[in-house]
Structures are given as C-alpha cells and as structure tokens.
C-alpha cells in the first residue's frame, strides 16, 4: 500500500489546510474511544525552540531510563518523523495501516490533515506507558493537540510574532499571540523558558 496515496487522500478531507476549531478532532477521537485521555503527556508550546526543547527533554528522560514517544510538526524529510514511539520513527507499513484504520473510522467526515494526523498519533500511542512529548502547532488554543485533558507539564518556549495572518489586523500583537498560545494551558506544572522582551 502506498503511503503517499493515503496522505494525498487525507489532505482532501477538508477544503482548508487550516481551520481553527477543536470540534472535528474531538469528534474523531470520540469515535476512537478518546485515546488522548490514556496518555501521559508533556506539551511544548511556543514560537521558537519547541523541537530542540523536545530533544533536550528526550535526552534527559532517556538518561533516567524513561521511555518517550514524540509527536512533532512539521517534518523535514518524511512524515514518519512526526510519529516517534520508543525512540523509533514509525515504519511506512505501520503508519499506512494506522492512517487507513483512522481514515475508515473517520468515515469521510471533514477534518484537516493536521487534525487526522494528531488523532492517529494519539490512537497509536494509547497502549503505551511512555511519556508523550507533544509539540503544539499553530498557536495552541485551537490546535488539535489541545484536546488532552491531563498533562504532566506544559512547557512554554520563546514566544514571538508568528502566524499573524490568522489574527484580525487589529489584534496582531504579542499580547494576543501570548493569549492564543497560553490561555488554555492545562492545570499542570507550567515551565516557562527565558523570554525576550
């Protein structure tokens, strides 16, 4: 089965690449028996430094003999980079099977590419006792990763001006970006990295 053909199909499930809402991913995860509720997660939110922060946490936990899974975005070479379980990228074969199963359960409902990938990550990780390092995508408040109900910690990396085209012109301020990225952080330990003013 051709992984690229599956990915092409998934990209056509919603007319927009980005459509800020949590309802679609919540509906799909409900059909998947809410796998996100079975995970131990650390969320990484911010503008810059998220992936390097994930790698630093991964190294610390590995040294402590704690296994991790990683969900990140975007990928550099292959989509498999976004799905890391037990320190290994998911294979093409397992990713194809996973995406086909989640696509069938979604049953043609409109959902963005990032949303269905996020739901698939949660679904695959649901039986793992590993800590999941979850990189938040666009902002955070309406990001598909923001349907996790419990968090071990939320880490806020440097926040700067990004994705301004998704904000009304009169709200394109650093204060609004900080609000979008942090207003819905879970009641967990919140770690804030050094911020430039």
Image (spheres, rainbow, N blue to C red):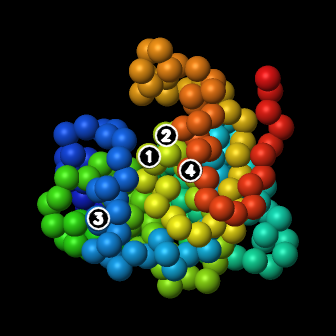
Question: Quick one: 29 or 58, which is closer to the camera?
Answer: 29
Report if residue 87 is visible in the image.
Answer: no
Q: Describe residue 3's horizontal placement relative to residue 125 as left or right.
A: left
Distance of mark 1 from mark 4, alpha carbons?
9 Å
Q: Callout 3: few (<14), some (14-19), or many (20+) C-alpha neighbours within 10 Å?
A: some
Which numbered disc, 1 or 4, marks the residue closer to the eye?
Answer: 4
The one of 16 and 171 positioned closer to us in this rendering: 171
Q: Position of residue 132 (x, y in %)?
A: 61, 68
Camera-side mark, 2 or 1: 1
Q: Are marks 4 and 2 in contact (CB under 8 Å)?
A: no
Q: Percent x, y for residue 52? A: 72, 47
Q: What's the distance in space between the residues labelled 2 and 1, CA to CA?
A: 8 Å
For marks 4 and 3, give the one nearer the viewer. Answer: 4
* Earlier sequence position, callout 4 versus callout 3: 3
Q: Earlier in the sequence, mark 1 or mark 4?
A: 1
- Measured along the vertical axis of the image, is residue 132 above or below residue 24? below
Q: Which residue is mark 2?
A: 138
Q: Name the outermost residue toward the left.
A: 108
Q: Give SS at disc 2.
A: loop
Residue 142's disc is 1
Q: CA distance from mark 4 to mark 2?
A: 14 Å
Give the mark, 4 or 2, whose residue is nearer the N terminus. 2
Q: Are marks 2 and 1 in contact (CB under 8 Å)?
A: yes
Location of the N terminus by quadrant is bottom left
Which residue is under mark 4? 184
Q: Report, in whole angstroms, how far the alpha carbon at label 3 lies from the one at label 2.
A: 20 Å
- The answer to whether residue 139 shows anywhere in this view is yes
* Image point (62%, 44%), residue name: 182
To which residue does mark 3 refer?
A: 27
């Amino acid at each position: 089965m051709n992984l690229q053909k599956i990915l092409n199909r998934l990209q056509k499930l919603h007319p927009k690449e980005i459509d800020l809402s949590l309802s679609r991913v919540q509906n799909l995860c409900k059909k998947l028996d809410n796998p996100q509720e079975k995970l131990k997660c650390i969320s990484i939110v911010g503008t810059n430094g998220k992936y390097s922060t994930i790698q630093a946490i991964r190294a610390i936990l590995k040294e402590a003999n704690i296994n991790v899974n990683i969900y990140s975005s975007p990928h550099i070479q292959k989509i498999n980079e976004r799905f890391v379980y037990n320190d290994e990228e998911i294979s093409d074969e397992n990713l194809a099977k996973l995406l086909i199963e989640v696509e069938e359960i979604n049953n043609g409902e409109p959902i963005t590419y990032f949303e269905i990938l996020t739901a698939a990550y949660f679904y695959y990780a649901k039986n793992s006792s590993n800590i999941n390092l979850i990189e938040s995508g666009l902002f955070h408040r309406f990001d598909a990763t923001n349907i996790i109900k419990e968090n071990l910690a939320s880490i806020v990396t440097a926040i700067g001006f990004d994705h301004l085209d998704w904000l009304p012109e009169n709200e394109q301020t650093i204060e609004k970006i900080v609000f979008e990225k942090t207003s819905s952080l879970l009641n967990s330990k919140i770690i804030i990295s050094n911020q430039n003013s």
